Image (cartoon, rainbow, N blue to C red):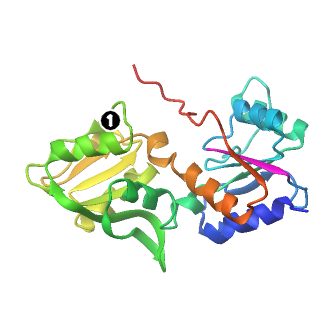
């Protein structure tokens, strides 16, 4: 019999809980490690709709990137999306696990997947915390690109409807840094690493005032991270080949709408 702890053990060999940021809440937030599991459903966000889908498909465990319970809950109400998802999961006996900054800090995780989309070479951790782990990555493009060419490549590879960018650099871009999700805190690290371009999400207005020779592209929080769902799916499918592992049929959980 496969239990919740067996599934979490596989995930944590890939993305150890010890790596998570102090402010994070990765790990098992609902359910018992000893509970039996017959099916897992994966998504980026644990929304009420995802829990409904888990009930419908018979999944007794949900694995997401973003934690369902991120900060302290003072009340659990069906009027709040988080509260409703918690109530639905508990009522249905569904375990909920998140691999958040743990999956951000391994090279094979979120930022590494971003680098692969652009075909970067010589990829290394942008803000290292130890042997091959840390936030963000930096690497080299297969061939230098103008700012316009880089923008077109990024929009194509990340399937973007739109993105925000700082003033285009005048010269060619050969070195690119990136961090999935909210990555403004690593802008300085990107410049120190010699990158001419930095990709992340949730960039504030003042950060777009960049120095000469350096450019920022805000590709969106969801858009920069969604590929981690495929990675986690492949990880569990490989380790549990006879086990029902499903990816949500409604992967687009982005709360931001573009008009």
Q: Main secondary structure of the magenta part?
A: strand
Residue farthest toward the bottom in the current orientation of the protein: 131
Residue 182 colored magenta? no
Residue 65: image location, x then y, percent: 61, 50
- The one nearer the camera, 137 or 250, is 250
Residue 39 colored magenta? yes
Q: Report if residue 240 is visible in the image.
A: yes
User: Is 238 left, or right, of 107 in this rendering?
Assistant: right
Is the residue 9 above or below the residue 83 in the image? Answer: below
Residue 161: image location, x then y, percent: 36, 30
Which range is magenta? 38-43
Is the residue 248 above or below the residue 145 in the image? Answer: above
- The one nearer the camera, 249 or 146, is 249
| Residue drawn 32% across the image and 35% down it | 163
User: Which residue in the protein does label 1 denote?
Assistant: 163
Q: Quadrant of the N terminus?
A: bottom right
Residue 254: image location, x then y, percent: 53, 33
Q: Residue 136, located in which quarter of the rendered image?
A: bottom left
Instruction: Tell me the element at label 1.
Output: loop
Q: Report if residue 21 is visible in the image.
A: no
User: Is 161 left, or right, of 50 in this rendering?
Assistant: left
- The one nearer the camera, 84 or 176, is 176
Q: Residues within 10 Å of mark 1 (few under 14, many from 20)?
A: few
| Residue drawn 43% across the image and 73% down it | 128
């Amino acid at each position: 019999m496969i239990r919740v702890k067996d599934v979490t053990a596989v995930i944590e060999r890939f993305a150890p809980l010890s790596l998570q940021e102090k402010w994070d809440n990765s790990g098992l937030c609902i359910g018992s490690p000893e509970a039996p599991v017959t099916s897992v459903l994966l998504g980026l966000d644990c929304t009420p709709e995802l829990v409904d889908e888990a009930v419908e498909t018979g999944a007794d465990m949900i694995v997401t990137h973003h934690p369902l319970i991120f900060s302290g809950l003072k009340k659990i109400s069906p009027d709040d999306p988080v509260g409703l998802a918690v109530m639905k999961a508990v009522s249905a006996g569904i375990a909920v696990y998140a691999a958040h900054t743990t999956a951000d800090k391994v090279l094979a995780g979120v930022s590494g997947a971003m680098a692969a989309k652009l075909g970067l070479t010589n990829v290394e951790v942008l803000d290292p915390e130890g042997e091959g782990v840390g936030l963000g990555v930096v690497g080299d493009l297969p061939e230098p690109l103008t700012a316009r060419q880089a923008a077109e490549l990024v929009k194509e590879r990340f399937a973007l409807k739109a993105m925000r960018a700082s003033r285009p650099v005048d010269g060619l871009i050969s070195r690119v840094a990136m961090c999935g999700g909210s990555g403004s805190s690593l802008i300085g690290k990107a410049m120190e690493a010699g990158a001419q371009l930095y990709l992340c999400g949730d960039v504030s207005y003042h950060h777009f005032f960049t120095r000469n020779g350096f450019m920022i592209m805000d590709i969106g929080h969801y858009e920069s991270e969604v590929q981690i769902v495929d990675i986690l799916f492949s990880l569990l499918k490989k380790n549990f080949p006879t086990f029902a592992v499903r990816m949500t049929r409604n992967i687009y959980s982005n709360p931001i709408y573009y008009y």
